[in-house]
Image (cartoon, rainbow, N blue to C red):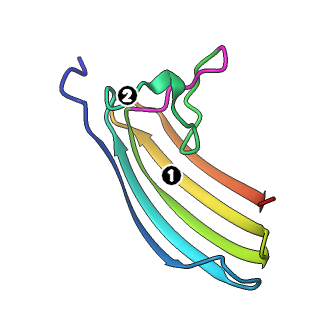
Amino acid sequence: MHHDEKDGYVLSIVVGGLDEPGDWLLGFYHSRIGALAVNASFTQDDWFRFGGSNGQTDSSDFKGHELRVARAISESLNLTARYFAVDALSGVRGSNRFRLDLNWAF
């Protein structure tokens, strides 16, 4: 069924940076990950949560976009907002997800 779906990519455009307090970052990401491009049980699940069990995920066989906006609060602290819009390559699963991260480097 998925024997030819071994490729995956993420393309991104990022403007800005988070080096100094008050800096901004804006990013756009487009992803397409074939069903056999990665071992889906052990990959990241930032883009969507299509299920899985026992601490594993199902993070392949999808295409989608991420929009990211971040602001540096201090040299070691930033706030990042991420919006994901994802659809399965096969089947009818889809996901819209918003995530807000407070990142602290120490």
Marker disc for residue 8: none
Q: Is residue 7 above or below residue 2?
A: below
Q: Give residue 83's quadrant in the image.
A: bottom right
* Nearest the eye: 83 or 72: 72
Residue type highlighted by circle 1: Ala
* 76 falls in the magenta region: no
In the image, what residue occupies the spot 51% across and 70% down?
Answer: 27
- Furthest residue in direction left, as rendered: 4
- Furthest residue in direction top, as rendered: 54
Q: Position of residue 86 (x, y in %)?
A: 47, 46
Helix, strand or loop at mark 1: strand
The reply, left or right, for residue 47 in relation to residue 92 is right
* Nearest the eye: 64 or 13: 13
* Residue where numbered disc 2 is placed: 91
Q: Quadrant where the C terminus lies?
A: bottom right
Q: Position of residue 62 (x, y in %)?
A: 39, 38
* Nearest the eye: 46 or 91: 46
Helix, strand or loop at mark 2: loop
Q: Which residues are magenta?
A: 54-60
* Residue where numbered disc 1 is placed: 85
Q: Is residue 30 above or below residue 25?
A: above
Mark 1 vs mark 2, CA separation in Å: 16 Å
